[in-house]
Amino acid sequence: MLDDDTLPLVKPVSPLVSPPTYRASGTAWSAYVSLMSTMLGSGIMTLPSAMAATTPLPNAVLLVMTGSMALMSFRTLCLVADATEAYSYEAISTRVFSPSQVWVLRILTVLPCFGSMLMNMLVAVDLLLPFQALFSRTILCLVFALVTFPMCLPNTLHALRMTNTMVVTSVLYIVAVLAGHAYGLPWPHDSAVERPLNSFSWGGVAYAIPIQIFSYGCHLNLVRTYGELEHKQSMRWVIFCIVSTGLALFAVASTSGYVIFQGHPPSNVLAGFPVADISITSVRVVLGVSLLLKMPLAFHPLRDMLEVVVLPRLLFSTTAFSPPWFRVCITTISLGMVTWIAIRTSDLGTAMTWVGTFDGVMFHFVVPGLFLVSTPSSQFATRLPRCATEMGWGVVCIGLYVAVASLSRLV
């Protein structure tokens, strides 16, 4: 556990201020639960559309491949954390990066936080699809922003962390409901789908990979959780278990949604069910409320980073907070941008591809590789295996290749 549990996951650490102290009291089980609560989220609802884009057999191969990529990036972060004895992206970067590189990373950190806010709003609005007969998408997005605005202003909202459990429970329920609906249905025939089953398409692969990588994402929480582990050797098994569990759940959700809609699942699989389906409607309500309450948790790290970028004096203080007027302005601008994008983006799958490219591929894969590449040139070089530099460059190159391939489909 952290001595100061109020510390945000990506709170900037000044070189003049000692990094947070970790009391290694965590267990393998607590680490597993924490990381699963971070990994399982809204991304699982777009996985059936990824299977439709790639067809079943290539999709299964991609799920294993992206899971292996996630496993590699997790291992990379653990190696760097071991060498530097730092347990956050910010603390690691201040040890192995130059000052200019640290600031670039701080700016890039805005992307996954902003992406999480956008996903929360998009999914919540899609879940409220039955109410769009009474209220337009614009009204629903504005109401969502207005309700979350006051919750984003305080420094800490510890009670909202409990909603992670609600989200995980909802996702498990979604997978169980999808499997129940798919049970007994026939497998789609070639005549029912756009392409022959198990055919290959580079466009489909470029669409699916960022979505799948985003679904495995729990990197910000992984470094912190690793620092809390009492027996750090157990982290290898924890990482293997979370990737294996995620792979199993993602495979069940993808296949079930694909079968239910006979090869044509919507980008948000829940949107394809009728309002009269009580089991799905109950999931919509629970998950929608959970995402509403999780919005401040996604915004707090974003606000912390923006405060340091705009007001650098806060970087050298452990107690100072931004002025109230600044906090109101930055909250209004951030929620306003998220709301505007959510109103104009009706396809959740496309949004997940953009966010997955920048968040899942770049921030969660390329950055850990750069950490490992930079560490051998620092005073921590003797704590790394001999092949650390080669492994780091391999991780970076694979991540960049996937990012370019995905972006080439979108632009």
Image (cartoon, grey):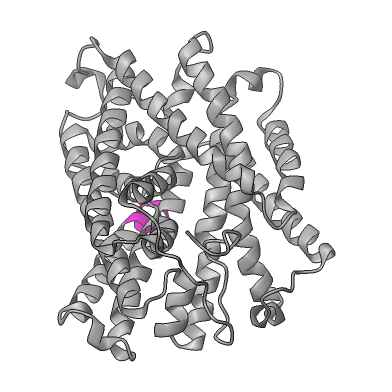
Q: Is residue 222 left or right of residue 343?
A: left
Where is 191 relative to 310, above or below? above
User: Which residue is pictured at 66% across the width and 49% down the height?
Assistant: 157
Magenta stretch, overall SS: helix
Where residue 61 sits: x, y (%)? 16, 43
User: Which residue is pictured at 57% across the width and 73% down the height?
Assistant: 12
Where residue 75 sits: x, y (%)? 25, 64
Where is 362 relative to 280, above or below? below
Where is 290 relative to 320, above or below? above
Seen from the viewer's position, the closer of residues 33 and 212 is 33
User: Which residue is pictured at 31% across the width and 86% down the height?
Assistant: 380
Where is 176 relative to 309, above or below? above
Where residue 200 sits: x, y (%)? 17, 41
Seen from the viewer's position, the closer of residues 234 and 139 is 234
Seen from the viewer's position, the closer of residues 164 and 118 is 164
Where residue 347 sits: x, y (%)? 49, 37
Q: Is residue 148 visible?
A: yes
Is 137 magenta? The answer is no
